[in-house]
Amino acid sequence: MWAWLVLSIPLLVVALILAPIFAVIFLVVFITGIISLARNSRTWLRFTSRKSAAWVTAAAAAGFLATAGVTNASVVSGSGARPVALASTSATTATATTATTPTPSPTPTPTAIPVEIVSVIDGDTIDTSVGKVRLIGIDAPESGAWGYDQATAELSSFLVPGGAVLVAVPGRDDQDQYGRLLRYVQIDGQDAGTRMLASGWAITRYDGRDGYGMHPLQAAYISLDESVPMPAEPAPTPVEPAPAPVDPAPAPPEPAEPDPAPATDPDFGTCKEANANGFGNYVRGQDPEYVWYDDRDKDGVVCEF
């Protein structure tokens, strides 16, 4: 009894020391046996019987589990580590995730300063005694676009020259890329941006939806914008084509001038006198003077030279 007890202690120490090596050997035998059984072929173990190969593979699996368990227990006990349950790890991760979730910060309180209005530039920009100001959260038509004149006139009618209040919203950019102050503008407590959206000559823009940051009136602005659409640009008035020019009526032809009466020689009464003055040889049917004289020889010519 004592002899077996004394012998078992060194064997146990040797098993603990060699357990990792045995675990690797059992794992190799187990994998080799699985491959052999799957391919129905002989391996380096040289088993000719599938039954023998199966028993050896099963024994290798059992040996691997035993030696691997011994190795794991010795490593854990030696390192002093404490196993942590998966559920505990998940709970810890969930707690860490919950702890790092950012808490929405409260909307900052706006600050207000009185100013003098110098001029209205367009439907969303004004010039004041402290510089140019761009209204927060709205956008109106630019110069040259449909609605520019109407939007400018609407804001001008609201912001009559005189005093106004600029309301800054902490947490947002103080100025835009053009150096204009970003502010709410109020007259007697009435907000200019709300007035422009209610008139339909402005839309909501440059707010928390497109990366410019939330502002206190954003929800009210969006609701108002959705209920009051901007007036549509009227269709251009068709231009009537100019009537085609009418060709003037042709002028009536001028009456033909009558042929001038044929000129005749003087009537001398006798061929002798006509010849003496250089006239004569009047042909019948050709010269009207022929009938004035007597054609004695009936040759059709009178007053021959």
Image: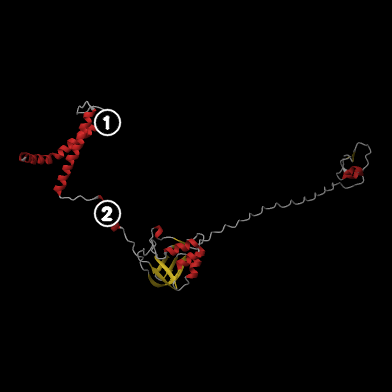
Quarter occupied by the C terminus: top right
Mark 2 or mark 1: whose residue is earlier in sequence: 1
Of 163 and 245, nearer the camera is 163
Q: Identify the residue at horizontal 19%, vertical 38% (top origin).
A: 64
State the image coordinates of residue 190 (x, y, percent, origin top left). 45, 71
Q: Could one spot residue 139 in this view of the protein?
A: no
Q: Identify the residue at horizontal 16%, vertical 42% (top origin).
A: 70
- Amino acid under disc 1: Ala
**Residues at marks 2 and 1, CA–CA distance in whole angstroms:** 43 Å
State the image coordinates of residue 109 (x, y, percent, origin top left). 36, 68
Q: Could one spot residue 155 in this view of the protein?
A: yes
State the image coordinates of residue 147 (x, y, percent, origin top left). 51, 61
**Which element carries disc 2, helix, strand or loop?**
helix
**Which element carries disc 1, helix, strand or loop?**
helix
Question: Which mark is on residue 91?
Answer: 2
Q: Identify the residue at horizontal 21%, vertical 33% (top origin).
A: 57
Q: Judge left or right: residue 224 versus residue 66.
A: right
State the image coordinates of residue 256 (x, y, percent, origin top left). 80, 49
- Amino acid under disc 2: Ala
Q: Is residue 18 above or below residue 94?
A: above
